[in-house]
Image (cartoon, rainbow, N blue to C red):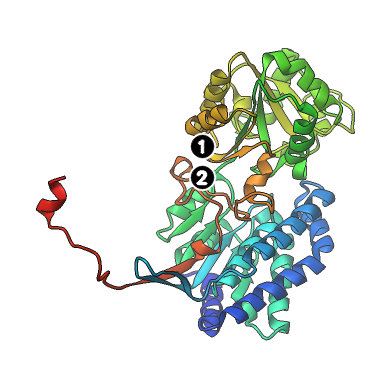
Amino acid sequence: MANEKIEGLMQKARAAQAQVADYTQEQADDMVRVVAKRCWAERERIAQLCVDDTGKGTYEFKLGKMENTTASVYMYLKGRKSVGLVEHDEKKKLWKYAKPVGVLACITPVTNPAATPIGNGLNVLKTRNAMIVCPHPGARKATGDTVELMRTALRENGHPEDLVQVVPESTMQDAADLMAAVDLILATGGPGMVKAAYSSGKPALGVGQGNVQCILDEDYDDLEKLVSAIVPSRMVDYGMPCTGEQTVHCPASKLDALIKAYASMKCHYIDDEAQIQKLRETLFVDGAINREIVGQPSYKIAKMAGIDIPEDTTLLLLKVGKCGKEEVLAKEILAPITRIFPYDSFEEAVERARTNMLMEGAGHSSCIWSNNPEHVAFAASRIPAGRVMVNQPATNGSGRQNNGLGQTVSLGCGYWGGNSVYHNVNYKDMLNYTIVSEILEDRKVLTPKEIMAD
């Protein structure tokens, strides 16, 4: 049976996209500008709505995420070519022309109900495509209002508002039907949803789970700098972003000093096995994450486990001694919790980090705090991560002004994570390309015998 709701949205999206298919670069950039400005102006209201609608995270973190995503993606897209001739290699006689894809589906998670459609939407408009957003059922209001902001900005500035739409009262069937109808899917969410996107029969840009492993090298001594960077990184939105540091592999000789540095930032360390077992049983139910703990403050999670800790606790630190399938705590935890794993040798730490990621989170991100280039190279060669962040928090994997990674709301996890890309998903992934090639007059053409004679 046809899904009339999705068919109606698709018809409007096709019509709107046809209107902008021949937009100039200046017109495409104007769409990005007016939408970014409107989202920025309404960031405080939308941040509060995200918390009220989902019951997860905090206003301060949601506001920061809105601000960073809107401003950073806007800045990243400024001045970049996405229309017509975008690359020219005179030496190889190649010309590359960019063209729109058509209509894209944006599947958004409950953990990121506003920043994801904004970040994806700015890239979609940059490339003269249309986007239909299918929100998580637990965030329909927040995502719906965010999309309406974008539509209003387009309409009031003379652009087709139906370039950006949202599926009302979305269901799992709506998501499936939408993915089957569009030209390209932007899938951000759990592994089940991403798998559904790749099974839809349409091209998909999916992301994988995060289970970030952080390695503190033996030669890195500025522990205050380390914790001042990774505590806020892990605390973002009460631990829901996939880029937060899940496990810190620490030299056994530095354990006491590291815990002391953490304590200065109101982190609470637990090494009592009985309490850790209570937390295992609270955090996971039959091996799956307990949804009740997602995006909740650490003191509430501890209380659920029958453990009293100060209400102003930032991170809950748990000492672990096993990795991979032997330790359920080695899985991704979408809450302000960090595992501390002491090690005796650097190689041992790398292998444990590798084991954890191959169990869950393969292809995502890791970070290492080290002054030893050989150790950095060794870690990068062994850990199955699309990004290894050096002496910076793992949240920088989404791209920052002071590193070379492109700003994104979707971090590809490569073939490790069952994704089609390993890099930070950006506007270039949302374009069709035509390559024009001319004969290289000065290039000698070798015969097969000449080639194989070497």
Q: Toward the viewer: 231 or 435? A: 435
Q: Is residue 285 left or right of residue 276?
A: left
Q: Where does the image place residue 105, in percent across and percent down from the top left?
A: 54, 64
Residue found at x 76% / y 72%: 38
Q: Earlier in the sequence, mark 1 or mark 2?
A: 1
Question: Answer yes or no: do the residues labelled 1 and 2 have beta carbons within 8 Å?
Answer: yes
| Circle 1: residue type | Ala
Q: Secondary structure at mark 2?
A: loop
Please state the horizontal and vertical placement of residue 299, each as a whole percent of the image: 83, 31
Q: Is residue 138 above or below residue 376?
A: below
In this picture, residue 236 sits left or right of residue 311:
left
Q: Residues within 10 Å of mark 1 (few under 14, many from 20)?
A: many
The numbered disc on residue 362 is 1
The residue shown at (78%, 48%) is: 55
Q: Quadrant of residue 97?
A: bottom left
- Callout 2: few (<14), some (14-19), or many (20+) C-alpha neighbours within 10 Å? many
User: Which residue is located at x 49 percent, y 48 percent?
Assistant: 422
Q: Quadrant of residue 220?
A: top right
Q: Position of residue 236 (x, y in %)?
A: 76, 43
In the displayed structure, 95 sits above or below 424; it is below
According to the picture, the residue beneath numbered tag 2 turns out to be 413
Is residue 247 something that shows in the picture? yes
> Is 346 or 27 nearer to us in this picture?
346
- The C terminus lies in which quarter of the figure? top left
* Cα distance in 3D space between marks 1 and 2: 7 Å
Q: Nearer the viewer, residue 274 or 376?
A: 376
Inspect the image, locate mark 2, and give the three-letter code of the amino acid beneath it: Cys
